[in-house]
Amino acid sequence: MRATKRDLSSIVKQNSIYQRLRISPIYDLYLALTKRRVIKARGRELDFYRMTLDGFEPGGLIFDIGANVGDKVDVFLKMGARVVAVDPDEGNQAILRDRFHRYRMTPRPVTIVGKAVGAKAGNEQMWVYGPGSLFNSLSEKSPGILDGTKKRSGHLLDAYQFKEKRIVATTTLDQLIETYGLPAFIKIDVVGYELEVLQGLHCPVPCLSFEIEVKELRKELIQCIEILGGLSSRGRFNYTCDRRNGLALDQWLDFGPFWRLIDGIDGCSEGCLEVFWKTLKG
């Protein structure tokens, strides 16, 4: 059977040489000459995080929960961060090691944790679409989320399917903090498992974000906001539908106003939004 374009793309992305080239000056030069829009987009994302994480200092710690192949890790490293990259997929872990550790005079300040993050430590079932897929998730609602995504994007219904279930080890945000220290920022992208991740956090952090599907996970979205609202009375919320356009609100809101805002929102054009929460200083 001939490989499809999507199959070939997946194979290329799993290739360690390709992933190492993507964070090299050679790749940046290639993009500058052939795909300036990509360079500009990467620059805008870096500017977004620098602005959103106002006061972040080089050497600060960031947790990347759902690190996948490390694209966000690369952004955080450009900010001067130390990164704890957490991902349960063995293929992604190998790519992360190839991108940031192997064959380097000085390995990048990236700690790779080969686990999923949830409400408790132990073992949980992961729905697997394919090696390294962004859709791999511990959420039982993953198939529904995938259906909603492919309908909005116009993909054929038979283009995606979950191929297997796999048991993976889990840890919690509390345990990660106990092991590695309090992070300046936690990025959460776990395709439907956001609530369980936040259920494993019992102390306020300077800032975190979680990306969530609004239509399929409205109840979970509200519960996530309630969990964060209960962590600190000094917590404030914001959100974005597209990091390239910055945050949606000019002012960060406390729990009540933000809860009412989100409870009435229909979502963004892509069906999901990214919620940001930070603890005010002082």
Image (cartoon, rainbow, N blue to C red):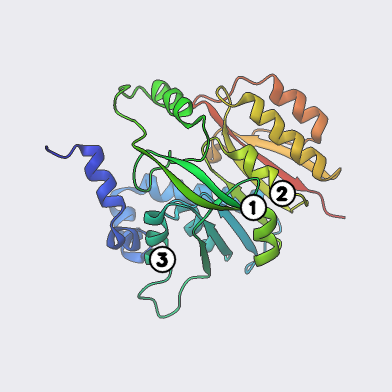
| Label located before the other in sequence (3 or 1) | 3
Which comes before the other along the chain, label 2 or label 3? Answer: 3
99, above or below 238, in the image: below
Locate residue 146, reporting x and y percent: 43, 29
Q: Name the amino acid, label 2.
A: Leu
In the picture, the disc for residue 201 is 2
Number of the front mark, 3 or 1: 1
In the drawing, does residue 84 fall left or right of residue 98? right
Q: Amino acid at mark 1?
A: Thr
Q: Which residue is mark 3?
A: 97
- Residue plotted at (42% across, 71% down): 101
Q: Which mark is residue 37?
A: none
Callout 1: SS: loop
**Residue 217's spot in the image, x, y percent?**
59, 27
Mark 2 to mark 3 CA distance (whole Å): 27 Å
Residue 163 left/right relative to 196 = left
User: Is residue 246 visible to the viewer in this orientation of the structure?
Assistant: no
Residue tagged by mark 1? Answer: 172
Q: Residue at x 79, y 38 (%)?
A: 229
Given the image, on which type of amino acid does mark 3 rest?
A: Arg
Q: Residues within 10 Å of mark 3 (few under 14, many from 20)?
A: many
Contact between labelled residues 2 and 1, with CB atoms less than 8 Å apart: yes
> How many residues crowd around disc 2 within 10 Å: few (fewer than 14), some, or many (20 or more)?
many
Q: Nearer the viewer, mark 2 or mark 3?
A: 2
